[in-house]
Amino acid sequence: MLRLEPSNLNFGHVPPKTPTTNSICITNTTVAPLDLALTNSAPNRYELTPTALHLQHNETATVKLTLR
């Protein structure tokens, strides 16, 4: 199981062509390590970093989503 915080992202009003970044923390709440591949479904609109994670039990990583 994964815990995501915050549970949603709101970029608010962003003027066109103004890159804006928001972050989400992903925590592995399982007892085993997890390898995650993160896929960007709209690469022309967003940048997602990193695109892969390896999380140990109770480890948290931050993923950044940049609106282009």
Image (spheres, rainbow, N blue to C red):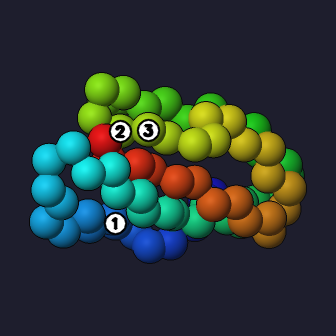
Question: From what the image shows, is residue 55 above or below residue 13?
Answer: above
In the picture provided, is 23 more to the left or to the right than 61?
Answer: left
Q: Read off the residue under disc 2.
A: 46
- Judging depth in this view, the residue of 54 and 63 nearest the camera is 63
| The label number, if any, that marks residue 8 in the structure image | 1
Query: Mark 1 vs mark 3: which is more N-terminal?
Result: 1
Quarter holding residue 46: top left
Looking at the image, which residue is at 41% across and 49% down? Answer: 66
Q: Identify the residue under disc 3.
A: 47
Q: Which residue lies furthest to the bottom in this view?
A: 6
- Residue 13, image x, y percentages: 13, 66
Q: Nearer the viewer, residue 29 or 16?
A: 16
What quarter of the picture does the N terminus occupy? bottom right
Q: Give me the C-alpha separation between circle 2 and circle 1.
A: 15 Å
Instruction: Left or right? Give the position of 5 relative to 61.
Output: left
Query: Real-space Cα distance between discs 1 and 3?
Result: 17 Å
Task: Say if mark 2 contacts mark 3, CB within 8 Å.
Answer: yes
Amino acid type, residue under disc 1 in the picture: Asn
Q: Within 10 Å of the Cα at label 3, are there few (<14), some (14-19), or many (20+) other Cα atoms?
A: some
Q: Position of residue 20 (x, y in %)?
A: 35, 57
Q: Residues within 10 Å of mark 2 (few under 14, many from 20)?
A: some
